[in-house]
Image (tube, helix red, strand yellow):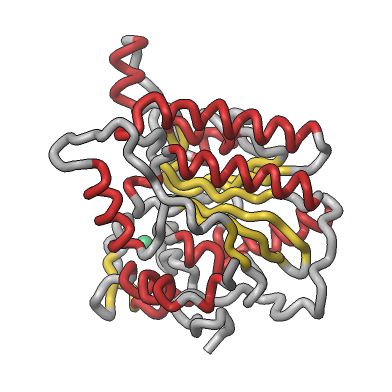
């Protein structure tokens, strides 16, 4: 169990996610935004409030108290029981994803603190094979729920996923049942689960643990749903309303509890953890301000 920020390979992976140029074009409003300004603003466009996707490392850096994160189960890596090959072998895809993200799998799990309150956390990495859930992602989510039940600390899961990992076949679908049972047991134990739906949260992840939180929060504009629009329209032979799989539509229809802009996420989670009775983290709570992205040194403190 190592402190997240003491692992330089993650720090370099985080850097690699950042576009090479000084300026980034916003995909929604087409404004050219100074990259550092975007990072200071938690990768939210300062012109139109478009929420760019965040890596798991950036997500944890943004919500957790500096230096509080301790990673768990980082040694779990995918296997290939089906010896699956499409255009290339599954394990070659895994290897490529690991090199691109610097992560062993599509979720990072551990323990940490938010505004001085202890929490068990998991953050999904969409950049790792579309944040797909195979056996390792399912196992890490289930273990996180078990850890939360044992410690009696709330669980906070940040989802960003295209769904089940096709290359693991039925084994990936099994993870929906496994994570659902684990979240159910956590609920039976009376320990709260907070779910944050990031862009996108779809397929098997949406249909299992992501929607099992006692409190379900989404990021503005996030795509959330099970099947894609085209598949549903072809199945039910009806036109679907505009924007029906957005966070805003789901809030309007009572499927989620709140939409929280990224800049407010940390104080919101801190308040919820306080209300849930999460225990105080030992030692003085460090900064009450979220750490802006891109200014982390490797020990997780602001440079
Ligand atoms: Zn914009």
Residue 169 position within the rendered picture, expressed as x and y whole percent measured from the top left: 35, 27
Nearer to us in this view, 269 or 186 = 186
Residue 72 quadrant:
bottom right
Residue 37 position within the rendered picture, expressed as x and y whole percent measured from the top left: 42, 78
Q: Is residue 83 visible?
A: yes
Nearer to us in this view, 61 or 111 = 111
Whether residue 220 sits left or right of residue 72 in the image: it is left
Q: Is residue 111 above or below residue 174?
A: below
Q: Is residue 221 visible?
A: no
Residue farthest bottom in this picture: 303
Q: Is residue 177 above or below residue 32?
A: above
Picture residue at 29% right of the left edge, 14% below the top: 234
Q: Is residue 300 above or below residue 75?
A: below
Residue 218 position within the rendered picture, expressed as x and y whole percent measured from the top left: 56, 46
Picture residue at 64% right of the left edge, 34% below the top: 212
Rendered-image quarter of ligand 1: bottom left
């Amino acid at each position: 169990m190592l402190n997240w920020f003491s692992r330089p390979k993650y720090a370099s992976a985080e850097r690699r996610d950042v576009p090479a140029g000084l300026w980034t074009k916003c995909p929604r409003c087409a404004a050219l935004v100074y990259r550092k300004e975007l990072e200071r603003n938690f990768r939210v466009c300062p012109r139109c409030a478009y929420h760019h996707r965040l890596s798991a490392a950036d997500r944890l850096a943004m919500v957790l108290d500096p230096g509080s994160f301790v990673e768990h189960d980082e040694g779990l890596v995918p296997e290939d029981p089906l010896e699956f090959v499409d255009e290339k072998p599954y394990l070659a895809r895994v290897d490529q994803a690991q090199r691109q993200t610097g992560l062993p799998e599509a979720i990072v799990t551990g323990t940490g603190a938010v505004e001085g309150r202890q929490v068990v956390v998991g953050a999904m990495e969409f950049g790792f094979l579309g944040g797909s859930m195979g056996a390792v992602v399912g196992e890490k989510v289930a273990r996180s729920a078990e850890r939360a039940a044992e410690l009696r600390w709330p669980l906070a899961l940040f989802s960003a996923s295209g769904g089940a990992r096709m290359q693991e076949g039925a084994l990936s679908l099994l993870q929906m049942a496994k994570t659902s049972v684990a979240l159910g047991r956590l609920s039976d134990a009376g320990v709260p689960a907070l779910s944050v739906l990031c862009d996108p949260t779809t397929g098997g992840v949406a249909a299992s643990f992501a929607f099992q939180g006692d409190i379900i929060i989404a990021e503005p504009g996030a795509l959330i749903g099970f099947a894609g629009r085209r598949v549903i329209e072809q199945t039910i032979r009806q036109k679907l309303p505009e924007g029906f799989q957005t966070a805003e539509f789901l809030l309007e229809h009572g499927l989620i509890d709140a939409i929280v802009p990224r800049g407010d996420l940390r104080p919101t989670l801190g308040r919820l953890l306080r209300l849930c009775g999460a225990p105080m983290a030992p030692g003085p709570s460090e900064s009450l301000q979220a750490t802006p992205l891109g200014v982390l040194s490797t020990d997780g403190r602001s440079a």
